[in-house]
Image (tube, rainbow, N blue to C red):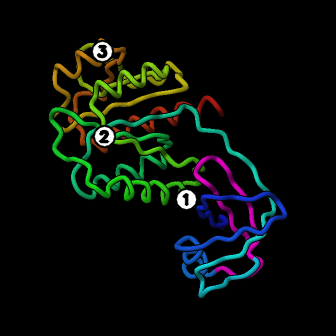
Amino acid sequence: MTEPLFFSEQLATPGATLVLKGDEAHHAAASRRLHDGDTLWLFDGRGGVVRTTLLRVVARGRTLELRVEERRTEPLPKPLIHLACALPKGDRQNILLDMATQLGMTRFTPLDCERRVVKPGANSAARWRKICLEACKQSRRFHLPVIETASPVGDVVKGATTEGSCVWLAHPAALAVAVSAAVNQKANDVTILIGPEGGFTKEEIDQAVADGGKLLTLGTSILRIETAALALLAAFTLSAGSDAA
């Protein structure tokens, strides 16, 4: 069985005692039914990882005392994938963020498109961070995706190209590049834009291309937002993994 992984904002050096509190400690003590001497892994969402030994459970399971046995830093995954997309409705947002994190998304921006239907709520960023955190623990990804504020298409494209990212807009145009050709470019930093189910407007597309974005097609089918996003994330992530192998 894989040893459990939990989140801690702060880590410590080998030999030190680390205190884990709150929901993560309660989950470890109650849900996983851990005992003194068990091994736990902690990560800080920034690549830091420690292996610890449980010394004792206190405060009715709300606090764990752990001894750090080893510490390492995991590098950022390659390619860096910035997903910028229109928000789907309801629980489909949760599915999108959960699976996108598992597939290697390192940054997320909700797109403020002209044809958008859904706007982020006041508590959306906090909820999305929690979903991404649980997905990191599930998939053992040690870098928590950065959640950005909602931005217009043009701002995302200009910012990404300025940073040297390879920018792709999902759009079924005749001159759009096929996914296989896009992933074969082997960029180390990729920005993927997915529009609302009504699609990007002609003005958004024209401006994005003028600013350095490139069009990418997933074929003739009209896909849901989260389907298109996950298909592209999987393509870029698996392509990088096959190179490493």
Q: In percent of the image, x 30 and y 15: which residue is there?
A: 209
Circle nearer the N terminus (1, 3): 1
Q: Residues within 10 Å of mark 2 (few under 14, many from 20)?
A: some
- What residue sits 36% from the left and 39% below the top? 109
Furthest residue to the bottom? 60
SS for dot 3: helix
Indicate whether 114 appears above or below 73. Answer: above
Magenta highlight range: 34-54
Quick check: 155 above or below 60? above
Q: Position of residue 116 (x, y in %)?
A: 18, 39
Which residue was labeled with disc 1? 137
Q: Residue tagged by mark 2? A: 150
Circle nearer the viewer, 2 or 1: 2
In three-dimensional space, the C-alpha distance between marks 2 and 3, rounded to whole angstroms, equals: 20 Å
Q: Residue at x 53, y 22 (%)?
A: 186
Q: Which mark is residue 209?
A: 3
Secondary element at image label 1: helix
